[in-house]
Amino acid sequence: MPIYAYKCESCGHAKDVLQKMSDDPLSVCPACGQPSFRKQVTAAGFQLKGSGWYVTDFRGGNTASAPAVADEGAAPAADGAAKPTGEAAAALAPVAAPAAAPAASPPPSSGLTPSA
């Protein structure tokens, strides 16, 4: 159930009220009894932080750089996740592309010069 902010226009009394969305708005001030208790417009009670998640984050594989591997004596990660070390880290390391084959050498010349 949402929490609505109310304020009396005659005496200035303010109150937050937990109500169902289907409930009628309050109109009588609980402090002075006047019918001038009005619902206020307020900001949302949460904030979105961080870089966010995008649908393109998971398309076409991983394009981000490989995560850094922590030293064994280093403090744990701030997010509480354990980082792999040793063989596990080596298994997760990116595989280097195979070296390009050397360019084919030109065919040996027959010693003949091309005629014009």
Image (cartoon, grey):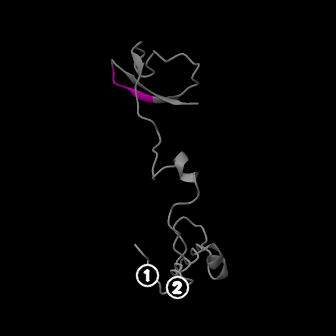
Q: Which residue is mark 1?
A: 113
Q: Magenta span has 39?
A: no
Which of the two residues, 50 or 98, is positioned nearer the viewer here?
A: 98
Quadrant for residue 85, please give it. Answer: bottom right
Q: Of all residues shown, which one is farthest toward the bottom?
A: 111
Residue type beneath disc 2? Pro
Magenta stretch, residue numbers: 11-15
Q: In terms of sequence position, does the residue under pointer 1 or pointer 2 come before the other?
A: 2
State the mark number for residue 63: none
Which of the two residues, 109 or 106, is positioned nearer the viewer here?
A: 109
Q: Above or below — where is 65 with respect to 70?
A: above
For the point 50% across and 62% down, which residue is it? 64
Residue at disc 1, secondary structure: loop
Alpha-carbon span between mark 1 and mark 2: 13 Å
The x and y percentages for residue 40 are 40, 25
The x and y percentages for residue 23 are 57, 18
For the point 42% across and 76% down, which residue is it? 115
Q: Which residue is mark 2?
A: 108
Which of the two residues, 113 or 76, is positioned nearer the viewer here?
A: 113
Compared across the picture, whether 14 is left or right of 64 comes to: left
Task: Sort mark 1 into few (<14), some (14-19) or many (20+) by Cα contacts within 10 Å.
Answer: few
Quadrant for residue 21, please give it. Answer: top right
